[in-house]
Amino acid sequence: MRKVSIFGATGSIGQNTIDLIKRAPDEYDVVALTGAQNIAQLAADAKALKAKIAITADEARLEDLRAALDGTGIAVAAGALAIVEAAHRPADWIMSSIVGAAGLAPGIAALSQGTTLALANKESLVCAGKLLLETGRAHGAQILPVDSEHSAVFQALVGEEIDAVERIIITASGGAFRDWPLENLPEATLEQASYHPNWDMGQRITIDSASMFNKAMEIIETREFFGVDPAMIEVLIHPQSMIHALVGFTDGALMAHVGPADMRHAIGYALHHPVRRHLPVERLDLAKIGAFEFRAPDDLRWPALRIAREVMARGGLAGAVFNAAKETALDGFIAGKLKFTQMSDVVSQTLDAMDASGGHIDATMTLDNVVETDHQARKVTRLAIEKKAR
Ligand code: NAD
Ligand code: MG
């Protein structure tokens, strides 16, 4: 029996992971499941999977969770510290699928026990890639990508030398607004931005897909994960989301990863790695699909792509500033305080302000410094949002 834990079990990635685990219940011994607001889901899954402990990030919901699991023998806990503690509980495989920078500390804790970490939480790589990778190396832990593009690149690289790689192309559907007239973008509503043409995902990553902040994060994720020069990373608009990434080699060959837009593929690959197992995903009928479409990305429509390049060129803790500013700008848009197109404005302003004041971005990359920089950047972004609202 493999001991597994799922951080962010109640979310879209977490639920897809649970779907796979439930199909082979005798193979897994579930240690910890974590969630936040959705106590009913967390409790139901903890019971169904016979987890040892269920934890909610929200301390105000501890009593609800306790009541829901009363008499089951499943331990309960609440709060960010309890989640980090649970990440230290021995497990052979841990899914990191909390959304946002909140996934960083549990990810570091999981790596420090030398486990295999399936990493969906791209924010932690953007905030503190070097720290995460170094922690993994120091403890002999393996990190496997779960983001579909990065799983695709990882698979295309099996048996290849990284020195023979010339370029890495990650694809983007273009999100909800890829065909909108540019002048309509400022008026895009929350509801319109929360729709994705191909993928069924959490609300935050869906809006980030419309603004391409998601792809911007993924460019940085590619750089951190595969250690390639930023100039080697390209983004290609591919509206069908069936080719997830392509790797270009020095001999001119391009290896493409083709598959359905179903996260259970990338999750399953990470769950069964290094072997491939049957997965319950659609088999593509290419003759029926007929053609794949590609377009160049447009920096005017998606300024986030340009910002990602600036963040990589800046280095230091600029990734932590970028992620915090992006998360705060997204909060502002969701709360109706920012227009859709103003999100990239306040992210740029935050990066400029934090760069000008130096200190935070140039600090050494420790967990404490990343957390402190994240807090400071959120403050600066909130001020920029207030100014816009006035
Ligand atoms: P989601 O919003 O559906 O789920 C988020 C999970 O995190 C939930 O379990 C929630 O309870 C938990 N959570 C939220 N705030 C928390 C906090 N402060 N502390 C602890 N836990 C908290 O998100 P998702 O779409 O499943 O995405 C999860 C991660 O996977 C994100 O980093 C996202 O970028 C990445 N990802 C998602 C997809 C996808 O298809 N959904 C694809 C690629 C990558
Ligand atoms: Mg992705």
Image (cartoon, rainbow, N blue to C red):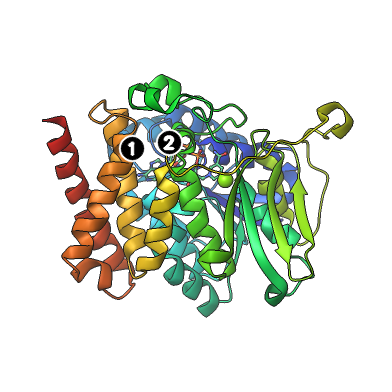
Give x and y (percent) for residue 27.
74, 50
* Image vertical order of residue 239 relative to residue 256, above or below: above
Which quarter of the picture shows residue 281? top right
Give x and y (percent) for residue 278.
83, 44
Q: Tell me the residue that label 2 is attached to.
A: 204
Label 2 crowding class (10 Å Cα cut-off): few <14, some 14-19, many 20+? Answer: some
Mark nearer the N terminus (1 vs 2)? 2
Identify the residue at image location x=50%, y=70%.
133
Quarter occupied by the N terminus: bottom right
Q: Residue furthest bottom?
A: 138
Q: Is residue 363 left or right of residue 118?
A: left
Q: Tell me the residue that label 1 is attached to.
A: 330
Cβ at disc 2 under 8 Å from ligand 1: yes
What's the amino acid at mark 1? Answer: Leu
Alpha carbons under labels 1 and 2: distance apart:
8 Å
* Image vertical order of residue 349 relative to residue 320, above or below: above
Q: Are marks 1 and 2 in contact (CB under 8 Å)?
A: yes
Give x and y (percent) for residue 380.
18, 50
Identify the residue at image location x=23%, y=50%.
349
Q: Is residue 373 left or right of residue 32?
A: left
What's the amino acid at mark 2? Answer: Arg
Q: Tag 1's secondary structure?
A: helix
- Residue closest to the eye, 298 or 64: 298
Res. 101 in view: yes
Identify the residue at image location x=68%, y=58%.
153
Identify the residue at image location x=55%, y=35%.
174
